[in-house]
Image (cartoon, helix red, strand yellow):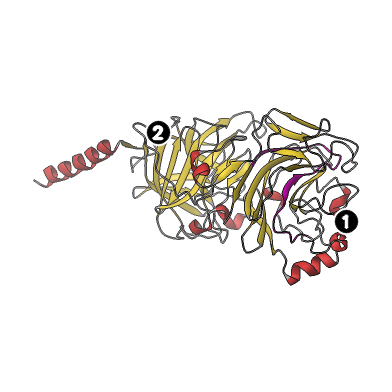
Amino acid sequence: MKNVLIIACLFAVSSSIAQNGFINLFDGKTLHGWKRVVGSGEYTVDNNMIVGTSVANSPNTFLATKKEYSNFILEFDAKIDDTSSNSGIQIRSHFDATENNGKGRVYGYQCEEDPSARKWSGGIYEEARRGWLYPVTLNPSAQNAFKVSAWNHYKVECIDNTIKTWLNNIPVAYLIDSISKKGFIALQVHAVTDSNMAGKKMYWKNIRIKTNNLTATPFPVTVFVVNMIPNNLTNNEAKNGWKLLFDGKTSDGWRGAFKTNFPDYGWRIDSGMITVLQSNGEQGKNGGDVVTTKEYSAFDLTFQFKTTPGANSGVKYFVTLKEKSDSSAIGLEYQVLDDKLHPDAKLGRNGDRTLASLYDLIPANKNERYYNPPEQWNWGRIIVYPNNHVEHWLNGIKVLEYERGSKEFEQLVAISKYKIWDHFGEAKEGHILLQDHGNEASFRSIKIKELK
């Protein structure tokens, strides 16, 4: 009778899984269906868990499924006991045997397991390619979802070009991207360079996947969407008030800063980009700055940008066009700069003319690890709240904040190049401006959401 009950229970569990459409990727006993790729980290099975163990002097090690998956819903439980460890699970990933001097390298999306004080668990990283795509700073309400030394339930939904993640039933990341539509799933044991970190363990269990009859799970419209498809606006973004400022094809909505029309020369629109052309670094001497035809007060503005080596440009806001200037129009400026090659990076005070800084006023507090060099895309974000609190972001990470019109702000203006203009940066509304600083710089995916 006892054996009959056991068999009946197993059949009931199996039927439940079949009815829900999920298939177990881990049988709880063996690593059947999985293979280790790259590195020498160890993977064993213990008490219905896959246990990963770090090994000294090893690069990232991955335990990958032998099968590839495109559209799916993946669920698993993960645990890490040590806050100094780090892990993740690869999705739609690949292996290139020619990389790393012939030792091979795994690349592709990774759903993060991050027990550190950074708290980016559930975020989306792209291994060995573009780096962080969705740091969880973009969704701070989810940063405390991961529990150290406890089991954490993950859900990852990949349907067409949309990737969403949940951690312990809390929505975390929402990514739109089309660079990889199919690949394997893999567990990561992170690289160890400090021998004291060898032997750290991470655990996974209840790994299952559903690949048929998929229905997209609704995500709160308040969660920020990272959309990597150029000049594209999803239904979720549109419902949340976002609009494209650049359609990727025309100059509609833009004009020269001191013109009635878009410049006839000095700018180029093609390949989904609006590009200011090289003119020997002379500020505003070619086509001149371009501005939005509309003015804005409180807003959330995002934009992708790419410069040539040594280039200088910027995105300005609260541009009234009332101040007299013999070069660029005047406004608060999100600096776009090659910090390593352009001399402006060493001018000003304390780095307040470097990339993502509030030009000549407040330096950006940024880590070189989280932004890309010239000729690669970065994305900026400027948020101006109705109460005049302002934030600059770079690739999903906040790098500075200030209060527009505050005493502290006015003191900074008083010791800057802007001191000659009364109430600089305090206008009620103004244009958004792309700067012609005489160097080639391209912009795309320029989006705005007006805040009330």
- Disc 2 on helix, strand or loop? loop
Q: Residue 40: x and y, percent?
A: 55, 42
Relative to residue 212, is residue 258 depicted above or below?
A: below
Number of numbered discs: 2
Helix or strand or loop: what does disc 1 sit on?
loop
Residue denoted by label 2: 33
Q: Residue at x 78, y 68 (%)?
A: 410
Foreground disc of the pair 2, 1: 1
- Which residue type carries mark 2? Gly
Q: Is residue 218 left or right of residue 327?
A: left
Q: Per the image, is 438 magenta?
A: yes
Residue 111 on image: x %, y %: 50, 45
Residue 269 picture quarter: top right
The residue at the far front in this view is 260
- Kindly tell me whether residue 203 is visible in this rendering: yes
Q: Residues within 10 Å of mark 1 (few under 14, many from 20)?
A: few
Quadrant the N terminus occupies: top left
Left or right, 203 with reference to 347: left
Q: Which residue is mark 1?
A: 347
- 147 within the magenta span: no
Q: Nearer the viewer, residue 166 or 118?
A: 166
Residue 344 on image: x %, y %: 86, 51
Which residue lies at the image location 66% right of the left edge and 37% below the top edge?
246
Picture disc at residue 257:
none
User: Which span is picked out in magenta?
Assistant: 425-446
